[in-house]
Image (tube, rainbow, N blue to C red):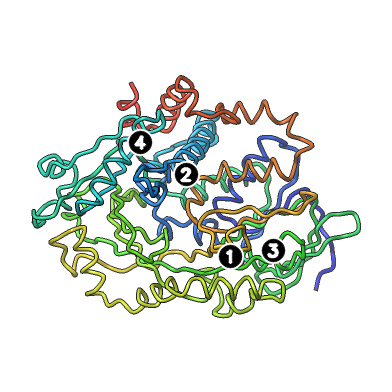
Amino acid sequence: MSNRESKTDVILIGAGIMSATLGTLLKELVPEWEIKVFEKLENAGEESSNEWNNAGTGHAALCELNYTVEKPDGSVDISKAININEQFQLSMQFWSYLVNSKLISNPQDFIMPLPHMSMVQGERNVSFLKKRFEAMTNNPLFQGMEFSDDPAKLMEWIPLIIEDRPSDEPIAATKIDTGTDVNFGALTRILFDHLKSKNVEIKYKHSVDNMKRTSDGSWALKVRNGSGGIERHTAKFVFIGGGGGSLHLLQKSGIPEGKHIGGFPVSGIFMVCNNPDVVAQHHAKVYGKAKVGAPPMSVPHLDTRFIDNKKSLLFGPFAGFSPKFLKTGSMFDLVTSVKPNNLVTMLSAGAKNMSLTKYLIEQVMLSKEKRLEELREFIPNAKLEDWDLVVAGQRVQVIKDTEAGKGTLQFGTEVINAADGSIAALLGASPGASTAVHVMLEVINKCFPQHMKEWESKIKEMIPSYGVSLMNNPELLRDIHTSTATALGLSAKELAYN
């Protein structure tokens, strides 16, 4: 056992997209700071950031119907969609800066242009989609969106979905060509390669067992290395970006802000098409409406993906339940996350979400044939032999006490930090990776307020719209669309915005 203590400025726990983004931002802002990364697996981006563990949608709220809510008066509230779109624009600007600064050589390794579409069936849903389309196209962020309920037009847009479909039910879709498919696994690996070249020490097969506050306000970490030995590391600032594993580490930190918070794990399964003839007939991400009782991350969608220089097709996700907090986690993760301080919160959440639990159990029990039935709602003539099952990443939804009551299940991404800014943890799920730049800027803002004045000009160099609403500045929005499209090689965007 080694008691030798190594001191550093910043420790990042977990080698996913969040740590990769925070590390890259900090290296640009203060190149002299020493950064260490601990990852319990053998490589970067193996859990939720991995390309097979998420939908890679590049969540810009262009097609996800759960970000736009129909109000009792029939109007559609698009405020959440506006928020998420503005956040995604920050990611696009930061990635463009990295490409323009030659820190990323080929953006096509991680991002491709791809139309984003929403599709609904039934009279009531078609009327909702039309109202949503009208509300969104009145906003400069969503310019270029088209709506159609004309079967001939839809056949042109989504032949695989429209072919052989019974024509008695009304169907409609919106389409916007400025969507993207993002390979967050590839992006994570690219960013860690860059950090390595900047002398950031990345230690794989190292898991953080424990952490405690030292007398000078730093954090002392007990880290288990690949051969089972114990290492001691201290840092002035710690970021816990371990996906589902973050909750346990936040609890070990003992900070009061981490109390009365629980986590609810949801697993997912995608169907992947292995027939190139079928893959060739579809070129879009098409999102439908979630079934009643389904959690927001279970919105069915049929996605074109670009993975390992190959075009593939994914359908899903089918939700499931596993008590693990990570794909490589333990069956005891959920049980051991229950502490005296969050017991009431967790029990309240359990009582409130019986219908969700029932839904998840039903999803786990689905046979392959039942899954095929759901797929046929999207592709009427889908054949079982053309599709394989792939298990997606684990998502841990945050449970906390809010104004809505004890044990409220949160769908989204949440940063928890100590009052003195010495430690921060990222919890939650979608839109996650897509808004990594916004979320990590929030971490920097909360944890390093004393540096913000001196860092602001560099942040604005990397992210020109930082601190500005793009929706209220259409000219800046146009400039940014053009410059990010050019830098990231998204020619479809250039066509749409010129």
**Foreground pick, 132 / 113:** 132
**Foreground pick, 6 / 471:** 471
Residue to which mark 2 is pinned: 80
- Residue type of the residue flagged with mark 2: Lys
Q: Secondary structure at mark 4?
A: helix
Q: CA distance from mark 2 to mark 1?
A: 20 Å
Q: CA distance from mark 4 to mark 2?
A: 13 Å
- Circle nearer the N terminus (3, 1): 3
- Circle nearer the N terminus (1, 4): 4
Q: Answer left or right for 67 relative to 262.
A: left
- Residue type of the residue flagged with mark 3: Leu
Query: Which residue does the image show at 30% across and 40% down from the upper left?
Result: 131
- Circle nearer the N terminus (4, 2): 2
Residue 168 picture location, percent across and down: 9, 55
Marker disc for residue 135? 4
Residue 461 picture location, percent across and down: 60, 26
Residue 76 picture location, percent across and down: 37, 43
